[in-house]
Image (cartoon, rainbow, N blue to C red):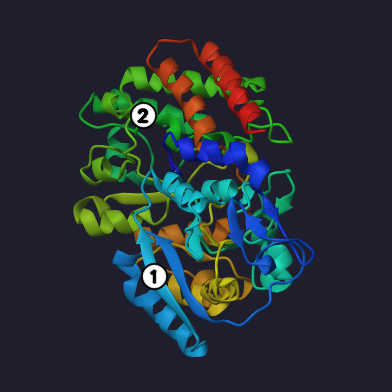
Amino acid sequence: MRAGRLTGTLAGVIALALTAAGCGLSGGSDSGDATAGGCEVDQGNVGSGKLTGDVEGKITFQTTNLKKDFGDFFNGVIKAFEKAHPDASVKWIDDPGDNTFTQRTVADAQACTLPDVLNLNSETGTALTKAGYLLDLGVKDPDAKQPFVPAFWNSSTMKDSSGMPQHTVLPWYTGGIVLTYNTDLLEQAGIDPAKPPTTLFGLFADYEKIAKAGRGKYYATMANPVWRIPADFDQMNIKMLADDGKSAVFADDPRTTEWVAWMAKLYKEGAMPKDSLSSSNDPSTLYSQGKVAYGSTNPSFVRFVKQNSPSVYAKTGVGQQPYDKLGHTTGAPQYIGVAATSKHAPAALAFAKFLTDAENQTAWCKDPDVVIFPTTTVSLDDPFFQKVTGDDPFSEARKLVAEQLKTTTAYQTNLSPAVQNAIVAQVQLAMQGKKSPEQAVKDAQSKADELLKQAG
């Protein structure tokens, strides 16, 4: 389960995708009124040419569920920026980051009230880029890429309505993908915590052992496949979309059907709570209660367990999520975007660059209560990230992620929530025994194709 993937039936995203080609970006020095999406904007925000102007005005900065734990840090960053730019001010707001995040963000964009600077995941950034609501940073500030690890910058691209790649986001912080597990429960099932499987099907085989040992008293994982699609397919190097992104091809790989068959078998055998098949809850609560053997793959999940269940934290182990056929992990960076609709775009861009620079990334990622890593070259060269010591779960997670970053990329399959939900729904039917795995995969691809065709 890869934490941070936001789900839900998001009609707003579908509408955004459908109207993207008609809105887009327009304007420039020779045009009339400029637009971004369906909103009137300053001419300098769109078209060709670098963004120019004074760093001034009041801008809004939106994060995702960070204010509670990191208020002091970000207030300090804002204060430092305002001191350096006395004519600019920053209002900080914090979105809860629940499963309606994309829907709310899309609604803000369509209402022309998108925050000036905002923390985005890949899915939301993709939707906003396609509809033209974010600054094309590669055009508006060609030097923006300089601080970042080239692999992160190069792979952190989004596509506009014509399918052309754009750099509309700055890579911010990233995590790794790790196994978090209850060592006691694994040992009860005859699984050696020190020898994590190297393939996802090997991990599924361990889930099956836990189902037989737990007998409903505890489980291996949560059932809802929304947490695993497309993460598992990416790790198995199953190609989900055609090169142009306009059709689905995952049914062409026989391992897709094998994966669905495993999920159906595990659900039937009791490896997952029956009531979790359609629940959007991640494993946080049940894991902290000692009722689920495997926790989230997000390394920062370790912090949640330490804060909420010290007794389970003492039994928590950290291992490498199977590399499987891909051979390395794909990072899931959080991004910073600048709204093309900003009335003070020069100030917004300056703050986005300040927030993501090496100094501020290094300072935040050194916080003892997070397991996150920076995306700038200078930050990653810091001994804090290169020479990790200790054998507690936090330290083990940091060691693993530090090793992963040597080979990781940010390339991930971007599915719209509508397409993801269509695929998930068919897998759920197979898990309930209402369809064969073969038919479920066939139908999933057909429904995904319909939605992709509608989106253009």
> Which mark identifies residue 243?
none
Q: Amino acid at mark 2?
A: Ala
Residue closer to the observer: 413 or 269: 413
Return the mark for residue 92: 1
Which image quarter: residue 207? top left
Which residue is pictured at 72% across the width and 59% down the height? 27
> Contact (CB < 8 A) between labels 2 and 1?
no
Does the image show residue 231?
no
- Residue 43 is situated, as x and y percent measured from the top left of the image, at 68, 66
Label located before the other in sequence (2 or 1): 1
Q: Estimate the spatial distance between the alpha carbons at disc 2 and disc 1, rounded to whole Å.
A: 36 Å
**In the rendering, at what x and y percent does residue 290 appear?**
22, 42
Considering every residue shown, the one lying at the far right of the view is 30
Residue at left offset 51%, top offset 58%: 334
Classify mark 1: helix, strand or loop. Answer: strand
In the image shown, does 162 or 312 lie closer to the viewer?
Answer: 162
Between tags 2 and 1, which lies in front?
1
Residue 411: image location, x then y, percent: 64, 48
Left or right: 424 as drawn, with respect to 171: left
Q: What residue is drawn where x is 42% and y is 48%?
A: 104
Give the vertical position of 22 relative to 138 (above or below): above
Q: Residues within 10 Å of mark 2 (few under 14, many from 20)?
A: many
The residue that appears at 56% across and 59% down in the rendered structure is: 403
Amino acid type, label 1: Trp
Is the N terminus in the top left, top right, bottom left or bottom right quadrant?
Answer: top left
Could you say which quadrant of the image residue 349 lies in?
Answer: bottom right
Q: In which quadrant of the rendered image does the C terminus lie?
A: top right
User: Is there any visible trace of residue 348 in the rendered image?
Assistant: yes
**Front-lying residue, 359 or 97:** 97
Which numbered tag is attached to residue 223?
2
